[in-house]
Image (tube, rainbow, N blue to C red):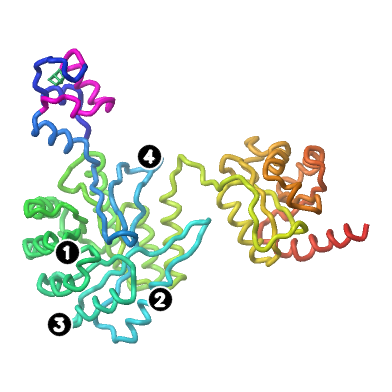
Amino acid sequence: MALTGLQIYKLLPKTNCGDCNFPTCMAFAMQVAAKKVALNQCPHASEEARAELAEASAPPMKLVTIGTDHNKVEVGQETVLFRHKEKFHHPTGIAVLVEDTLTDSQLDDEISSINKLKFTRVGEEISVNFVALQHKSTTARDYANLTEKVVEKSDFPLILICKDPSIMESALKIAGNRKPLLYAATKKNYEKMASLAKEFNCPLAVYAESLEELAALTQDVKKIGVDELVLDPGSREPKTALDNLTRLRRLAVEKTFRPVGYPTIIFTGESDSFQEIIQASTYVCKYANIVALSAKTSWQILPLLTVRQNIYTDPQVPNAVESRLYEIGAVTPTSPLLVTTNFSLTYFTVESEVENSKVPAYICSVDTEGMGVLNAYAGDKWSAEKAAKTLEQQKAREKISHNTVIIPGLVAVFRAELIDEFGWDVLVGPEDAARIPSFLKNEWKGYMSKKEQR
Ligand code: SF4
């Protein structure tokens, strides 16, 4: 929690020397509290004062980086419980589990499936984030083999899951340079695990069966010199796990309780495929920073990633694409021209249906401040005049020869007005984007052949 002006004043020398360009230490402290100046503007502030202020102004939840360079994932540094207050900053990392009891060919299949769990949705690449290597066998050799194979076959950042420090060390000798998350330090092994995390410069997960024990354990680990921590509050039973995650988030961001000011990891406890995804989605919503699960197929993972994508959009920023003329496929001057809004979901739905049609086309997205067709119409954000202006700015007249615009069926009412404003023919397209392919293949082609005969 940020310090008040009075608290900052108590940390200052109180000599009112004026070297900071403020007449008194109190005046300076008030400006520091208001974040208008930095403490280092006072050349006489002690190291202790600087350290205390830095600690107080640090984010309530630490940012933890797993992986290196372009293959890294950042989790944590969240500041709110509810995203309407600000936004959630770092999307929940999705970790897919593989075990060291698999045969070589089973492992190859699993890694190959995981590597394919990448999708494009609403113009954004979405994918799982980690491969989590679970030690289940009785030997260190099997775990080292698994680590070796995964390092060789996948670029995803890693989570090493093994509570035996000597086996963890053998895996770290193979994968330590990928900066994996080590899972997990417990009451029994934390000294050795923290030493490994320190030696290999890796983040460390801390596991305990109660929040009180967890808070105490993070302090013990921190004393060893490891402060990139991820918390596992223990329970795999959904109600208790959700309760734990919510309490941890509340303690971190509302109470600024530093011993639990770290991101969290949770594991699903379901064997049923459908239930597992429902459980994982619940944890994405509240408040896991990493969810580990065994699901590896597209039909399971895509819904989970969709939930995550929706939760981690900024509710205060319209989800919009750039307003311009897009070319889909190998367009020519006779390709159809569709007009739509710049709301991302609307634009990408239209774009994907145009792609499905295999008919190259232009799409002109009009700036509606990120609103969909009907909302923009109701909110006066989309008018025939605005559409005509965008077409003019995008030089549609120079690129297109058939002098025809297709408007969404939901705003057929604009047809006559747009004809007046832009002077081209206006065709009313389908109300539902799913009908675009048949519209382009049938109505559009019929319209063009009649036009050519005229
Ligand atoms: S420079 Fe430091 S000690 Fe001097 S008035 Fe400013 S805050 Fe006070």
Which secondary structure lies at badge 3? loop
Residue hosting label 1? 184
Residue 207 relative to residue 390: left or right: left
Residue 280: image tag? none
Residue 111 relative to residue 450: left or right: left
Residue hosting label 4? 86
Mark 1 burial class by Cα count in 10 Å: few <14, some 14-19, many 20+:
many
Q: In the rendered image of this protein, does residue 378 appear above or below residue 132?
A: above
Residue 113: image tag? 2
Q: Quadrant of the N terminus?
A: top left
Whole-angstrom CA distance, mark 4 to mark 3, is: 48 Å
The x, y position of residue 16, in whole percent, is 12, 14
Residue 264 relative to residue 374: left or right: left
Ligand 1, by image quadrant, is: top left
The x, y position of residue 17, in whole percent, is 12, 15
Whole-angstrom CA distance, mark 3 to mark 1, is: 18 Å
Whole-angstrom CA distance, mark 3 to mark 2, is: 26 Å
Whole-angstrom CA distance, mark 4 to mark 1, is: 32 Å
Q: In the rendered image of this protein, does residue 374 appear above or below residue 451?
A: above
Q: Is residue 205 visible?
A: no
Residue depicted at 23% across the width and 44% down the height: 252
Residue depicted at 80% across the width and 48% down the height: 426
Is ligand 1 within 8 Å of the beta carbon of the residue shown at mark 3? no
Whole-angstrom CA distance, mark 2 to mark 1, is: 26 Å
Q: Which of the two discs, 3 and 2, labels the residue nearer the N terminus?
A: 2
Q: Which of the two discs, 3 and 1, labels the residue nearer the N terminus?
A: 3
- Determine the image quadrant of residue 336: bottom right
Is residue 36 a member of the stretch shown in magenta? yes
**Which amino acid type is shown beneath numbered disc 2?**
Ser
Mark 3 burial class by Cα count in 10 Å: few <14, some 14-19, many 20+:
few
> Quick check: marks 2 and 4 in contact, CB under 8 Å?
no
